[in-house]
Amino acid sequence: MRDAPLLTFTPAGIFCPAGDFHIDPSAPVQRALITHGHSDHARRGHAAYLCTKAALPVIRHRLGRIAAEAIGYGETRLIGGVEVSFHPAGHVPGSAQIRVARAGEVWVVSGDYKTEDDGLAEAFAPVPCHAFVTECTFGLPIYRWEPQPVTMAAIADWWAGNAAKGVTSILAAYSFGKAQRLIAGLPYGPILTHPAVADVTDILVSQGYPLPQTLRVTPGMTPQTHPGALVIAPPNALASGWADRFAPHATGFASGWMTLAARRRGVDRGFALSDHADWPGLNAAIRATGATRIFATHGYTAPFCRWLDSQGYAAGVVP
Amino acid sequence: MIRLARLLAELNQPGNDKARAVAGFLRDAPDPAAHRLLTDPPRRMISLAVYRTWVEDDTGLPPWLIDAARSATGDLAEALALCLPPPPPLARLPDLAQVLASLASLPPGPLARAELLALSAAMPPPERAALIRLVTGTLRLAVDPDTLLRAHRLAAGQALPAQILHSILAVMIYAEATVPPGAGGPELTLALASGNGLVPIARARTALPAAETQSLLAWVRAASTGRFGPLHRVPATQLVTLAFEAVMPNRRRASGIALTRPQVVAWHPDRAVSDAAPLAALTGLLPNAP
């Protein structure tokens, strides 16, 4: 057991043999450390869950009754002789990087992260380590975000322009994280939220996150009852025609994928606002850890690893 | 450049009314050089392959990474536009007319590297991609003459025909030097090649935007070789696109045919008269043609 690597990559996901725990596993396991509550990271079926105190309420909302413990940012815990701690990732409220250390060797699993402080999620800070497992969702030089205030101003401008023409603005955004970031970052005005968004917003408000008041959409609401409104709904709600009650409307989508012209074809406006690090952010974060071994997961893994190799890292793709 | 980038995006949006998108562009960009983009491909200044090497040199990004970027976008011009550094904040975006004028003043492609890169530096990626397509000759506006005519009519607030329109390249041989009353611009007499000469096939009014109409009238007055009432004879050097709804036989005419609702929808001052269609192109459209 002493000679096994601190973290290994198995079919169920990242596994620590010494501590006998997985991180964000994709198949049911005995003990799962969870970076954040998005469904591709926090899944059903594990016997025991560990996450940050800030992440737990949304995770319970999404997974129902689970055996879960919570830990504060920066607190350390020993699991099977392995020192474990959670650190801010800046991706969504409550999101964490997970630091794992034993016998002087330190690994950090980034989970999903972004390097810009969005004023809502606990801001990313690089954690020094020898080996860094990093996402690379937007790991190509074509992905470069504008500073948040610039993108928020563009969205606000679009909203105001539509309102002046009597058109309702429908903004598609993931219901946990992106939606609340928009609510917090846009100027105050009539913001209506799809129930999936409202459910998460209510939880985060009850936790003390600073979010202005928004209105949950109920059956009677129309452009006449709420003129000039911005409606925030998950992308699948738009596809289902849920927003038709707000016609005439213009649709926007807030996502890093709106960088690509081909992805903008389905909407009236695309806004490149992402909760993942862009190319400069990824490169800076990796450099700041001081790690020499980098494992890329979740994105453009092959070209990103080849790039890291060319920059002098020992890089590998997480299988 | 914003208008051109927007037009490209709207033409690529599935389900969009292309005529409406083009009409918007015509109304927003009343510049003859801009309009000519819709009918005549601009001259290529530098190949996309060479432009790519400039981007690789300037950014230090290796070719295989540019390939990965191209895979992600599905389009090399867009990938290059995104790989170049972002524009400085508050950079003033040059106007399409200014850009076209700047391009026209540049030396041959390889010598204009610094100027071409500087021109794109102030543009955000969608406008930058449109510029790259312009200078590399890969601007595919894909506006067929039928759509173009509908767009002109929409831009002018006219009703749209329900018929399918045919369009051919014809030579202008007579023209009015002023705009008569009623819908449309000056009336031109158009001809096609037949044997060793030109045969008149139609008289048609122009449906061109105001600025281009003025340019045409100025050319007619300067080039006139004789006056016949309101008509001026002009050298047979100017090619136009003539749209019409149908061809019918007419034995009283030298050409043997008559066109229904002919309209001149484009003027091509930079194209060679040898590109004009032969008369046989029309006779092939006659009902009961073999």
Image: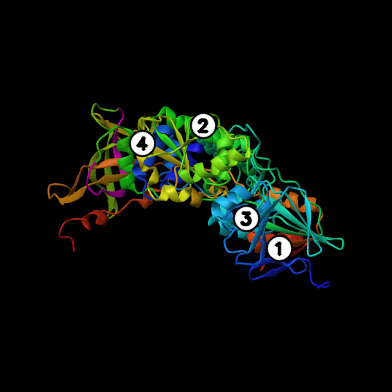
Label disc, if present, on residue A137 of the rendered structure: 3
In this rendering, does residue B223 appear at all?
yes
Please tell me in which quadrant of the rendered image residue B290 appears: bottom left
Q: CA distance from mark 3 to mark 2?
A: 28 Å
Q: Quadrant of the C terminus of chain A?
A: bottom right
What whole-number distance in Å separates the C-alpha atoms at marks 3 and 4? Answer: 39 Å
- In this rendering, position of residue B208 left or right of residue A28: left
Q: Secondary structure at mark 4?
A: loop
Q: Residues within 10 Å of mark 2 (few under 14, many from 20)?
A: few
Q: Looking at the image, which is closer to me, B3 or A276?
A: A276
Task: Compute the Cα span from label 2 to label 4.
Answer: 27 Å
Q: Earlier in the sequence, mark 4 or mark 1?
A: 4
For badge 1, the amino acid type reads Arg
Under mark 3, the amino acid is Thr
Q: Which residue is mark 1?
A: A306
The residue type indicated by label 4 comes to Gly
Do marks 2 and 4 both belong to one polypeptide chain? Answer: yes
Image spot of residue B94 (x, y percent)? 56, 34
**Label 2, on which residue?**
A157
Q: Residue at x 70, y 46 (%)?
A: A115
**Highlighted range, magenta:** B161-178
Which of discs 1 and 3 lies nearer the camera? The answer is 3
